[in-house]
Each structure stands twice: as structure tokens, then as C-alpha cells.
């Protein structure tokens, strides 16, 4: 499985944008990029995913480099509820029912009031 | 409404005992999973079932046996519990390849 590299921790001020980087230099052409987050004492929560193009949803935006070797999760206006561990995950294309998510160590995001 | 629920939330037991963790999803999803998060917070997949059929079986001791009585339920039975089994166990479900929904977790402590 291709690996991802994320900073161990980041801090951001409340109500400011947050850019969470992820490097995945060994990504294959068919790997999807997924982001999940885990709030304290909760299960992981899906945030966003993409393949080649930038993606937006109600939670965040995903910016994918042209060579796909890196991506950035963007929280447009961080709130205290966004404090969590954010995981960048590469998911190989596979038969449905075999969707194994391989979690790394993630980035612990702290929001400063 | 709870989408993916697990019982119990906390489980404290002694080494050598047998215990079960139950998972139910009311999302109508076809695929369910079990993940283990150890004390260092690494989250690893253990099993997945699609329409009651075992799809993923990672390198897990055969003391762990998943059981899916129907596609809304995936239970995890653990025999002869060991200290190293202490962890948080998460159940998840999905209907598409893109998004998995996780339960709140079951914290298992083996003493």
C-alpha cells in the first residue's frame, strides 16, 4: 500500500482557515485520496475524497497537486469543534466490499480560541 | 437516530474470558467492518463483511471470530482474551466505496 506522510500536529486560530498537508509520493494512478477525522473519544468521520481534481463539500475542500504526489485539506473557517486527528488515506481501487482503509498516524489539529 | 451503534461502550474483563461486542447499523448498508485502535492510537482493519459474506480477514488471531446474522449486524466474539487485546474496537458500515460510517467504539480492557 502506498504511504502518506502528515505532520504530527498543527495549531490554528479559531475562525481562520486551516491547511492540512499530506505527502503521498508513491501514489498510484488509481489510488483515491480520502480524508477522515477523529474527534476525541469518537469514531472516525468521513471528511472528503478525491482522485485528480480539487473537491469541495460542506465540510472542507481538497486540493490535489497536479502530479498527485501531495494534497491539502482545507478547512475554510476553523471552529473549536474541528479539533481532531485528521487522517489522509490512500485507497486503492478494488472490488466493492474490499474497501480497506489503512490509517496512518494523522495530524492532531488544535484550535486556539 | 443512531446510524452505527455498538454495545457495550465499555468492557472490562479478565484474561482468559470470552466476550462479544455487538454492532448494528440502521443505514441499510451492505458492507460492515471491524477496526481495532490500540493504545498508540493506530487504527487497523480486522474484518469486513459484504451481505453477510466475509470479504476481508486481516492477520488477526483466530481467537477473534466475526459473525453476521444479517446484513445489519456484525458481532465480534473474542475467545481466551489476552492483555494485548485491550484496545478500542470500532464497527463501521458503508454502501459506496467512498464513505465509511463508524460507530462510537467499544473500549475493551483486559486485566
Image (cartoon, grey):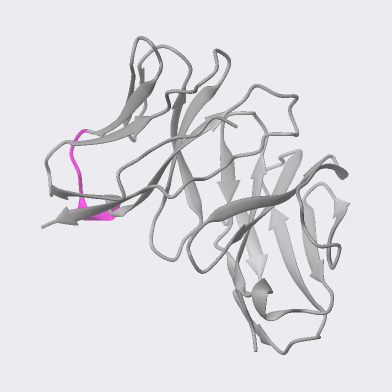
Is A37 left or right of B18, judged from the image as shown?
left
Identify which residue is drawn at 60% across, 40% down: A101
- Would residue A9 be found to the left or right of residue B28 on screen? left
The residue positioned 48% from the left and 46% from the top of the image is: A104
Image location of residue A69, percent across then percent down: 39, 20
Where residue A50 appears, as percent x and y from the top left, is 46, 21
**Is residue A69 found inside the magenta-colored segment of the image?**
no
Q: Is the magenta stretch mostly helix, strand or loop?
A: loop
Residue B84, by quadrant, is bottom right
* Image quarter in which the C terminus of chain A is found: bottom left
* Above or below, B79 relative to B2: below
Residue A72 appearing in the image:
yes
Which residue is nearer to you in this view: A5 or B71?
A5
Residue A57, picture quadrant: top left
User: On screen, A63 above or below B107?
Assistant: above
Location of residue B16 in the rendering, given as x and y in whole percent from the top left corner: 81, 86
Q: What stretch is highlighted in magenta?
A: A76-81
Say if the magenta span includes residue A77: yes
In this orientation, which residue lies closer to the viewer: B39 or B101? B39
Amino acid at each position: 500500500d502506498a504511504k502518506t506522510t502528515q505532520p504530527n500536529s498543527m495549531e490554528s486560530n479559531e475562525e481562520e482557515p486551516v491547511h492540512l498537508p499530506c505527502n503521498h509520493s508513491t501514489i498510484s494512478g488509481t489510488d483515491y485520496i480520502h480524508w477522515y477525522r477523529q474527534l476525541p473519544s469518537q469514531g472516525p468521520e468521513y471528511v472528503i475524497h478525491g482522485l485528480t481534481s480539487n473537491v469541495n463539500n460542506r465540510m472542507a475542500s481538497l486540493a490535489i497537486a497536479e502530479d498527485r504526489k501531495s494534497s491539502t485539506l482545507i478547512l475554510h473557517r476553523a471552529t473549536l469543534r474541528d479539533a481532531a486527528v485528521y487522517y489522509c488515506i490512500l485507497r486503492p481501487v478494488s472490488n466493492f466490499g474490499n474497501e480497506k482503509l489503512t490509517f496512518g498516524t494523522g495530524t492532531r489539529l488544535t484550535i486556539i480560541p | 437516530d443512531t446510524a452505527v451503534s455498538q454495545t457495550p461502550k465499555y468492557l472490562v474483563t479478565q484474561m482468559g474470558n470470552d466476550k462479544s461486542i455487538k454492532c448494528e447499523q440502521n443505514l441499510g448498508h451492505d458492507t460492515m467492518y471491524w477496526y481495532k485502535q490500540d493504545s498508540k492510537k493506530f487504527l487497523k482493519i480486522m474484518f469486513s463483511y459484504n451481505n453477510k459474506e466475509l470479504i476481508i480477514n486481516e492477520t488477526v488471531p483466530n481467537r477473534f471470530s466475526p459473525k453476521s446474522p444479517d446484513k445489519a449486524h456484525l458481532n465480534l466474539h473474542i475467545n481466551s482474551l489476552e492483555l494485548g487485546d485491550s484496545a478500542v474496537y470500532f464497527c463501521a458500515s458503508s454502501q459506496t466505496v467512498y464513505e465509511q460510517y463508524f460507530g462510537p467504539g467499544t473500549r475493551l480492557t483486559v486485566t
